[in-house]
Amino acid sequence: MSALLKFRPGFTIVPFDAPLGAEVIGLDVGAPLDDDDFAVLHQAHLDHHVLVFRDQQISPRQQVRFSRRFGPLQIHVLRQFQLASDPEVLIISNIRENGQPIGLGDAGHYWHSDLSYKAIPSLGSMLHAQELPQEGGDTLFANQHTAWNTLPADLRAAVSEARAEHSYLAKYAELQKRNPWRPDLTQAQIDEVTPAIHPVVRRHPETGQPALFVSEHFTTRIIGLPDSESRALLQALFDHSSNPSLVYRHRWQAGDLVFWDNRSVTHLAAGCPADQRRMLYRTTIEGDAPF
């Protein structure tokens, strides 16, 4: 960690020695947060894109309340994995009870930005650790502002005005082959996730900074290009956008709450042994239409 970035009575914000990310020390997110402290936290999120809050002993209801300080919440299409007491919470878990999965066990298998397949994608997501494996389970975050800033000139020229399609179904059948318990979608669910078209390079609505906005999980094609050209261009973007030089690797600790900006980063779940239990609670904050 580097020198302290911000100090407020009660909590500090310490940037990581990484391409993005900072730890918020001394803040209980379950307690009331006044407007001045919220403003500092909000700015830190814009500056660092990923905020880590350690040892948060909070309930799902408190997580929902804290998430709503940043905007209305979005409900994931797989409602069977909602937390019964708090439907805004999506259960991310490889645990099975009575032979059935209690949560989405392969979330984050590919690099992605949450809900980029929606016409109104996510502002950000919060993930709170409930049960962690002894091995693995890390989450990787890649800085997409830096990805754009370091993109070779020929690729910048090729995509600066381009638009791409994002589809929730892009990898769904492939994931079902890997994980047979991943549920079939009803027609109503399919209708809920019709593909969306977004700029390949989006400007952050709060900072104005450009960022790449494509991912191997959800982005299917560049609009207006032949399939072969589209695939080649997207692969070049995927490879560049997940370069290790852009990545902060989060190693989870008990009670961690991680809050990331889906307008600025993509993320990937590194996976863990199948016989080790993992469960986290996710809330997702609604953003706005990319431009």
Image (spheres, rainbow, N blue to C red):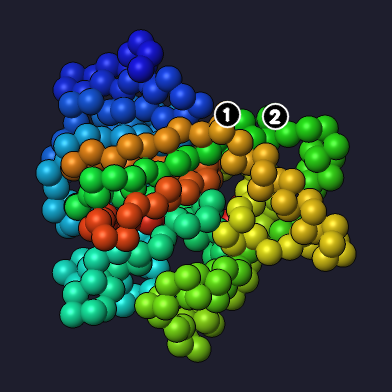
Please tell me which residue is depicted at 17% across the width and 37% down the height of the picture. 55
Residue found at the far top of this picture: 3
Please tell me which residue is depicted at 34% across the width and 48% down the height of the picture. 137
| Front-lying residue, 2 or 192 | 2
Q: Which residue is mark 1?
A: 245
**The quarter of the displayed image where residue 104 is located:** bottom left
- Give amino acid for label 1: Ser
Please tell me which residue is depicted at 35% across the width and 17% down the height of the picture. 1
Q: Is residue 17 depicted above or below 35 in this figure?
A: above
Q: Are marks 1 and 2 in contact (CB under 8 Å)?
A: yes
Please tell me which residue is depicted at 45% across the width and 87% down the height of the picture. 186
Q: Is residue 274 depicted above or below 149 in this figure?
A: below
Q: Relative to residue 9, is residue 137 drawn left or right?
A: right
C-alpha gap between disc 1 and disc 2: 10 Å
Q: Earlier in the sequence, mark 1 or mark 2?
A: 2
Which of discs 1 and 2 lies nearer the camera? The answer is 1
| Front-lying residue, 34 or 116 | 116
Q: Which residue is mark 2?
A: 150
